[in-house]
């Protein structure tokens, strides 16, 4: 699916894209305040990455107004411009009639800040695309105008490949600023933790990130699948139904990988709370040592990486609060010989850059500092 795709702009994960569009929105507002026009943003990306959700979350977090349209659903220009009404000021006078348009219901009427999202714009008919050009250029059409402090965001699937899209010519492309969203397992896992996605699903994605973003296996299809298995406490006991649900939403390779993930007992990889709350760290240490190798003795860096990432996400979550024993257990975990130096350094740097003084205090330890210096 990825070969031959035509995408535009900086390629980045959802966090990077949000920073870019935040700057553009701020600059657009500055330009509007000076009587100049801002510029719409087009977010490109393959299907199921969460482009639409990214924009919705951005508006919700800032308490901005939000309006959504899917131009592919428009059958005629009236869906965009609104319906005409004939006004006759004086029925006794012939020829004084004139036509006005009633804007569609979705057109924002109150001052922003707000976002008008034109979702999957290049799925629309070419005639509808041409009708959007004035809106993208001037934030208005002949029949209506966006209120002040409204931004326009467009999402689009890449041209080329197998996508059924309407190509946009240079006149339309140059009316917008462009970015391309790419999948990042760690960023997705941060979102999934907050969204209460099944922890077993999060562990799977972190263990096998290379399986994601195929034609059928996307963050969206995985979220659907994980939602369906969330009420099954014992996946092994329900293997036939789990396999059927996996095949209903994922490609065959990902389905087979998830079944192996269950059969290897990896779906029950150590929960971060088990590490932090351990009354006797030696028992936790034994489990980590066992998980760090497979049955033939080969080191499983993927498992260790998943454990480290999930521990980081736990410590960074908004509802985390350090309790007695957490610091000691964290230090013991970081000093385990089974944790490779690159994983150790990566986790330590991520925690130290967090800006959270509570976390910085937890990793302040002389013996850990010595180990880090040796590992450099």
Image (spheres, helix red, strand yellow):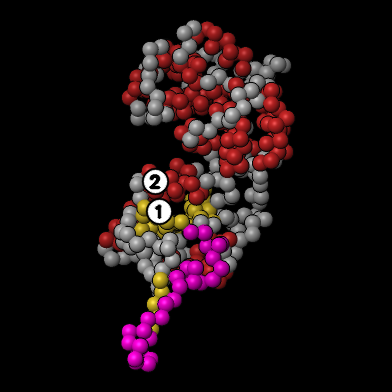
Q: Foreground: 96 or 4?
A: 96
Q: How far is mark 1 from mark 2, CA to CA? A: 8 Å
Evaluate whether residue 38 shows in this view.
no
Mark nearer the N terminus (1 vs 2): 2
Q: Which residue has dot 1 on it?
A: 66
Callout 2 crowding tier (Cα within 10 Å): few <14, some 14–19, many ≥20: few
Q: Quadrant of residue 223?
A: top right
Reply above or below: 66 against 61: below
What SS does tag 2 mark? helix
Magenta span includes 76: yes
Contact, CB < 8 Å: mark 1 with mark 2?
A: yes
Task: Tell me if residue 180 can be seen.
Answer: yes
Residue 296 forms part of the magenta stretch? no
Point out which mark residue 60 bears: 2
Residue at the spot 48% in from the left edge and 46% down from the top edge: 53
**On screen, residue 94 above or below 170:** below
Question: Which segment is the magenta one?
Answer: 69-97
């Amino acid at each position: 699916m990825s070969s031959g795709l035509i995408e535009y702009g900086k390629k980045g994960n959802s966090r990077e894209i949000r920073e870019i569009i935040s700057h553009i929105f701020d600059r657009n507002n500055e330009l509007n305040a000076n009587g100049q026009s801002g510029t719409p943003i087009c977010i490109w990306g393959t299907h199921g990455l969460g482009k639409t959700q990214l924009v919705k979350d951005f508006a919700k977090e800032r308490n901005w107004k939000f309006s959504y349209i899917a131009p592919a659903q428009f059958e005629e220009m009236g869906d965009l411009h609104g319906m005409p009404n004939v006004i006759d000021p004086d029925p006794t006078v012939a020829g004084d009639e004139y036509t006005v348009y009633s804007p569609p219901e979705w057109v924002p009427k109150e001052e922003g800040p707000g976002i008008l999202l034109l979702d999957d714009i290049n799925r629309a008919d070419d005639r509808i695309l041409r009708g959007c050009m004035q809106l993208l250029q001037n934030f208005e059409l002949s029949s209506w105008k966006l209120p002040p402090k409204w931004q326009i965001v467009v999402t689009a699937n890449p041209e080329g490949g197998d996508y059924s899209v309407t190509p946009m010519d240079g006149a339309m492309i140059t009316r917008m600023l462009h970015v391309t969203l790419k999948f990042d397992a760690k960023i997705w896992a941060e979102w999934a933790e907050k969204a209460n996605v099944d922890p077993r699903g999060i562990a799977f994605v972190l263990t096998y990130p290379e399986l994601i973003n195929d034609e059928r296996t996307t963050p969206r299809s995985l979220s659907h699948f994980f939602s369906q298995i969330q009420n099954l406490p014992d996946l092994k006991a329900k293997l036939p139904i789990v396999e059927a649900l996996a095949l209903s939403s994922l490609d065959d390779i990902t389905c087979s990988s998830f079944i192996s993930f269950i059969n290897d007992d990896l779906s029950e990889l150590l929960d971060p709370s088990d590490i932090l709350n351990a009354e006797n760290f030696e028992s936790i240490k034994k489990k980590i040592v066992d998980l760090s190798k497979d049955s033939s003795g080969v080191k499983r860096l993927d498992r260790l990486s998943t454990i480290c990432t999930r521990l980081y996400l736990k410590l960074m979550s908004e509802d985390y609060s350090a309790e007695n024993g957490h610091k000691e257990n964290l230090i013991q975990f970081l000093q385990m010989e089974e944790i490779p130096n690159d994983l150790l350094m990566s986790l330590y740097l991520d925690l130290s850059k967090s800006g959270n003084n509570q976390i910085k205090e937890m990793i302040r330890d002389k013996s850990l500092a010595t180990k880090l210096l040796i590992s450099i």
